[in-house]
Image: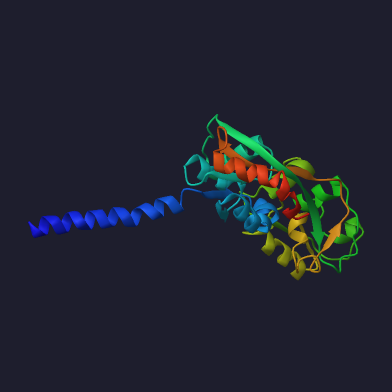
């Protein structure tokens, strides 16, 4: 009998221990996906959001396509995308080979601008769409062809699931493939660091990343045609009450925390 009572008591204690955990995690919201949204929107306003709403925000910056796959697989409450919804779906399919469900909803928070960067020593200050296309596809392989130094061109770009890469490739390269040998990096910070390291380098990243402390001095922004895209949270159907609070915060009083 003692053993039976002891077992029941242990079950009761385990239930009591688990209860606070469930309550504490009730307002946890997981957002996976675009590192641009993570760095420009979510991280700068995280503390104020949590104070204003009681939500605990958990972020994983693994790229638009990967984040959308996580949403579809139930691993997060919303996924961040730094491109149009249809393009985000295509990014997921390109990265995973999987089709997206029909109930996805894009909830736009703000817009973002992609800027072309080169090494600070590069004398080139302006590039047309055609020149950008030629540089990134390999048709032009020396900077002197576009008014720069006599140096070979080194193209630096993000990983396959990156929305920034996809938007740039669509808008400036007419979806043509990148030059063979282009350096692919895992993060935007590494893309900036690589361009800062190589006088021959060229990349294309979110303006918000360039404006982060310590980055602006590393690279030079080149004048190009405007490259803009929406920043959104994707949900399965209508956002949950908690995700709605996040969207309302960053499109309302939390706008001031969004990094330009």
**Residue located at (52% from left, 44% from top):** 77
Q: Quadrant of residue 120?
A: bottom right
Name the quarter where the C terminus is drawn. bottom right
Q: Is residue 178 left or right of residue 75?
A: right
Q: Is residue 46 left or right of residue 3?
A: right
* Residue 209 point in image, percent of width and height: 73, 59
Between 13 and 171, which is closer to the camera in this rendering? 13
**Residue located at (47% from left, 42% from top):** 73
**Residue located at (72% from left, 44% from top):** 252
* Residue 163 point in image, percent of width and height: 67, 47
Residue 62 drawn above or below residue 216: above
Between 177 and 23, which is closer to the camera in this rendering? 23
Name the quarter where the N terminus is drawn. bottom left
Query: How many numbered circles are shown?
Result: 0
* Residue 256 point in image, percent of width and height: 76, 52
| Res 6 visible | yes
Give the residue at the far top of this rendering: 102
Give the residue at the far left of this rendering: 1
Q: Quadrant of residue 171?
A: top right
Q: Is residue 31 left or right of residue 201?
A: left
């Amino acid at each position: 009998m003692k053993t039976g009572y002891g077992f029941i008591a242990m079950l009761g204690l385990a239930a009591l221990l688990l209860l606070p955990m469930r309550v504490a995690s009730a307002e946890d919201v997981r957002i996976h996906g675009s590192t641009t949204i993570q760095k420009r929107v979510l991280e700068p306003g995280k503390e104020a959001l949590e104070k204003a709403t009681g939500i605990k925000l958990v972020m994983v910056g693994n790229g638009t396509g990967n984040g959308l796959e996580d949403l579809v697989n139930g691993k997060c409450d919303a996924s961040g995308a730094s491109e149009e919804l249809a393009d985000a779906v295509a990014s997921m399919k390109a990265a995973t080979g999987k089709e997206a469900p029909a109930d996805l909803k894009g909830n736009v928070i703000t817009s973002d601008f992609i800027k072309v960067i080169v090494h600070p020593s590069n004398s080139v200050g302006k590039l047309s769409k055609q020149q950008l296309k030629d540089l990134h596809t390999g048709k032009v392989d020396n900077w002197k062809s576009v008014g720069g130094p006599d140096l070979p061109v080194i193209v630096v770009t993000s990983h396959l699931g990156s929305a920034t890469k996809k938007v740039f490739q669509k808008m400036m390269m007419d979806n043509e493939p990148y030059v063979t040998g282009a350096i692919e990096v895992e993060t935007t910070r590494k893309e900036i660091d690589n361009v800062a390291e190589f006088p021959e380098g060229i990349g294309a990243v979110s303006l918000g990343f360039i404006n982060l402390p310590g980055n602006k001095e590393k690279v030079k922004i080149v004048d190009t045609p405007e490259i803009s895209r929406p920043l959104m949270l994707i949900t399965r159907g209508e956002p949950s009450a908690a995700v709605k609070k996040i969207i309302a915060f960053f499109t309302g009083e939390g706008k001031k925390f969004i990094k330009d």
